[in-house]
Amino acid sequence: MAAAWLPDLVAAWVAAAAINCQLELEAMGHEQICKRIRQALSALRGWWRGASGTHTYDAYLQHADKQSTKPLTAQQFYLDDIQRKYSRPNRCC
């Protein structure tokens, strides 16, 4: 579940990017603007995957491929990950 402040942060980032690039974008052609938008969305997607932890399964698949082992399904991987995280004693309590 995403944090409550995340939509505000994303909206602020998009607004700041639009303000900072407004004059530059006016001088660009349509193709360059589309390229910039794709780059920004790609960067945002990468940030989101890192923040949410979904990149870990991709890293696991690459590791399993190098080890020549049969990988777990995405559901099995996440259940195993949750079990590993929360089955140990937590020092905070």
Image: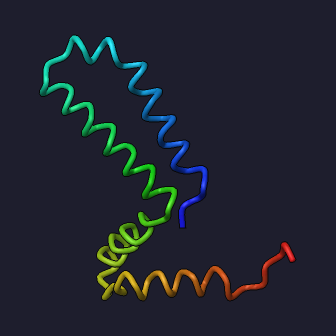
- In the rendered view, would you say 87 is above or below 4? below
Residue occupying the point 43% across, 66% down: 54
For the N terminus, give its image quadrant: bottom right
Q: Is residue 1 left or right of residue 15?
A: right
Where residue 55 appears, as percent x and y from the top left, is: 41, 63
- In the rendered view, would you say 81 is above or below 41? below
Q: Is residue 8 left or right of residue 90?
A: left
Q: Quadrant of residue 15?
A: top left
- In the rendered view, would you say 73 is above or below 11? below
Residue occupying the point 49% across, 65% down: 53
Residue occupying the point 59% across, 58% down: 3
Where residue 25 appears, as percent x and y from the top left, is: 26, 18
Q: Which sits in the foreground, 68 or 17?
A: 17
- In the rendered view, would you say 35 is above or below 27? below
Where residue 93 appears, as percent x and y from the top left, is: 87, 77
Q: Quadrant of residue 2?
A: bottom right
Where residue 39 appears, as percent x and y from the top left, is: 28, 37
Residue occupying the point 42% across, 19% down: 20
User: Which residue of the protein is positioned furthest toward the right in this rendering?
Assistant: 93
